[in-house]
Image: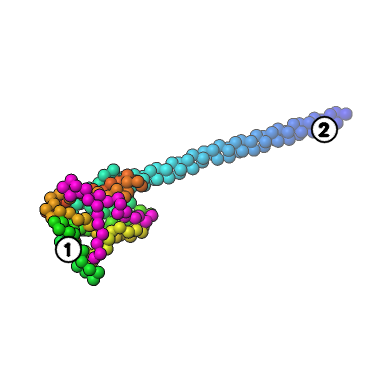
Amino acid sequence: MKARNKLVGVLFLALCLFTGCGKTQTKNATESSMSSITSEKGTAPADNTKDSNESFLNQDEKAEQTPVPKKAAISLKEDYSDSGRSVSVLGLKEYSKLKGDFGVDKPGKGSVFLVLFLEIENSSKEKTYINPYEVTGKADGKELENTVLVNQPEGYPTLFTNIESGMSQKGFIVWKVPVNWKNFEFSYTGWKGSDGLTLEASFSKKNLKDPKAY
């Protein structure tokens, strides 16, 4: 009987020890799972940091773009450029008449043709059209309409055309002005509707200059 009681005691002790080991393993597994979750949470901010860096770089790229002013002046010595275009004055010349294969252009008594030669480079992503109705010219305060020539002065074509993206165009604009004009003012508002830019220039007879051959 005593031997049987001892055997029962041994079995009971063994059962207690086995149950304790099981609890320890469960606790270790739970701690391992919690550690894994904590580790995963710790890596989350890395994605946020990446997004923040990309946003900062995008802001830098925007800041590098040249802002477009409301008005800009050009002259024989001063070009204009921004992220969408650049404009250069190539020359300014008077003609009492123009002869060519298609006849003779005459400005009329007491007048001369005043021809402005420009080069425009389109650095935007879309084509741009140089609109003749957006051009204003004034001779000594009197507003004048630009005119049309049969011939091409110095071989230059008219500037009123489409300029494709990434391309440049050399051309002329012409007015009939009094022979004794002193001050001529030019403005172009063709970009005012898209980005608010008005281009302006002011010339005197001292600014007359032959353009380079086309």
Q: Position of residue 8 (x, y in %)?
A: 82, 31
Q: Which residue is mark 2?
A: 7
User: Which contiguous range is marked in magenta?
Assistant: 126-151
Q: Quadrant of the N terminus?
A: top right
Nearer the observer: mark 2 or 1; the answer is 1
Quadrant that contains the C terminus = bottom left
- Mark 2 and mark 1 lie on one chain; the one further toward the N terminus is 2
Secondary structure found at label 1 = loop
Towards the viewer: 89 or 116:
116
Q: Write the residue at 18% across / 46% down.
A: 141
**Residue sticking out furthest to the bottom:** 101
Q: Marks 2 and 1: CB-CB under 8 Å?
A: no
Determine which residue is flagged by label 1.
97
Q: Report the residue that reaches farthest toward the front.
A: 109
The residue located at (17%, 49%) in the rendering is 139
Residue 148, percent across and down? 26, 59
Residue 27 visible from this viewpoint = yes
- Residue 41, percent from left and from top: 54, 38
Task: Give the x, y percent position of residue 208.
Answer: 14, 56
Q: Residues within 10 Å of mark 2 (few under 14, many from 20)?
A: few
Residue at coordinates 25% horizontally, 49% vertically from top-left? 136
Q: Mark 2 belongs to which amino acid?
A: Leu
From the viewer's perspective, is 6 left or right of 213? right
